[in-house]
Image (spheres, helix red, strand yellow):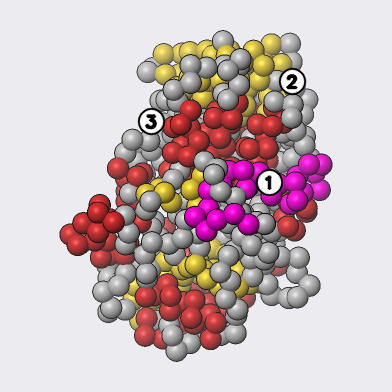
Amino acid sequence: MYDYVIVGAGSAGCVLAARLSEDPDVTVCLIEAGPTDDNENIRVPILGARLFRTHMDWDYAANGEPHCDYRRIYLPRGRMVGGSSSMNGMIYTRGTRADFDGWRQPGWSFDEMLPYFKKSEDNERGPSEYHGVGGPLSVSDIRYDSPTATAFVDAAVEAGFKVNEDFNGPAEDGFGFFQFTHRDGQRCSAATAFLHPALARPNLTVETEFHVSRVSFANGRASGIVGYQSGELTEIRAEREVILSAGSYNSPQLLMLSGVGPAEMLRAQGVPVILDQPEVGQNLQDHPHAWLVFEHSDPVSLIVAGEPEQVRRYEQEHAGPRTINGPVSGGYVRMTDAAPGPDLQFVCVPVMVTDAGLTPPSGHAISYGACVLHPRSRGQVTLHSSEPTAKPRIVFNYYAEPSDLEMALNGLRLGLEIARQNSLRPYTASPVAAPASESVSDLRAHLRRYTQTLHHPSGTCAMGSVVDEHLRVRGVEGLRVVDASVMPTVVRANTNAAVIAIAEKAADLIRGQ
């Protein structure tokens, strides 16, 4: 028996476990399906892709995207302590004022969320109106000078865009270099930042390799969880609350396995209905992204990270190409002055990206592309089976809304325009993945063939429908959801920073502050 049982030791779960256990009078149990995070492939950023399709990856897939040639799109998610923050690209961006204000949820405006971003942050640039220092999460500038990533920014400026030296400042618009969740060149995951310093507390218990099957209920109230650890069926009880922080795929799956979801679908799967909640698993959003890839002959891509000199540099100086996990530079573009925030985000990676990162690069290359930041298309997460270890059925419906397709076409055209600029031209003469021409049909064909996730699933347990503004599941007691699934709309940014801020605020809500 614990006061709080948290399911999922990803970004939100690590924050909640650390913050709630600050009170010595409460007991907290954090449960993770995967292993601990003491793997070198987590610590050294460049090695992150080695975790794909291992026991530390949920290894999901979007099932036959109808507007992307019915391709199965690989969806990696961290299945380890730290969750996806232990394998992501480490970009630290937050989203815009329009995102949080647009949720229209009491207490969740941008002005109300900014203090939580600053509370978490330890930014090496120092304190400011928009940044904090002294928090658990290290936020650092890049420790690697990439010629191609620099050329990409220079080319964007040549194409008429402005420079932005801080995407988390007054506005996102413009091109520049990202900041990252680094600590001295090593990955600073949510586990490193929040959980590890709290592990010595006697009131905090962390259970790994524990696959939760369902939430248990008694008299309409969540009373604990049931799952398997070391092959044995185990129950852990919660005196105060069960908190699902399993992510935008697994949190709705767990709710449905527990009998909270669309009643007709649950009955068809043989799941006893606790609460008919049709919106569980609906409203799935992501940032659809399509790479442009160009091969070149200069030995300046991330392939050099494996050379002995770069290994030595990393171990001695904690600098160089081994300090990154792909993204280096990028930018945000607003297609019209009337838009409330940027419409497109560009990400530039100084390496060849093929097969969603599953195929090693065959030569030196640069890869970049734009994603649709504020998609109108909606997908869903549903049960494939009532068997708890079965993977959920995930459909994003990328480009189902014509406005999303048109915005993606805009991003593709801008990407090709940037490729033609003098600064980038030496690196873009040999296309590996690019449209056959700039005709609408060829641009659309490229999007259908190359669109993939930007790893930002959100919205499947949204505030205002599944949970209230305190993140309590509507219709039952003692149950909350705290992760990216509670976002009514996905933020115009990489989502990890926002998830950490959501969890910071949730900890205060749970404590009644």
Residue 99 drawn above or below residue 81: below
- On screen, residue 5 above or below 94: above
Q: Earlier in the sequence, mark 1 or mark 3?
A: 3
Q: Residue at x 56, y 35 (%)?
A: 15
Q: Which residue is depicted at the point 43% across and 75% down?
A: 150
Can you give x and y, in whole percent of width and height, for residue 426 in the image? 37, 85
Asked where in the image residue 461 lies, by quadrant, the reply is top right
Residue indicated by mark 2:
477
Q: The C terminus is located in which quarter?
A: top right
At mark 1, the secondary structure is: helix
In the rendered structure, the answer to whether residue 311 lies left or right of residue 161 reads left
Could one spot residue 512 in this view of the protein? yes
- Which residue occupies 63% across, 47% down? 117
Other residues around mark 2 within 10 Å, as few (<14) / some (14–19) / many (≥20): some
Boundaries of the magenta span: 104-128
Query: Where residue 396 sits in the image (x, y, percent)?
Result: 60, 52
Checking the image for residue 35, the label placed there is 3
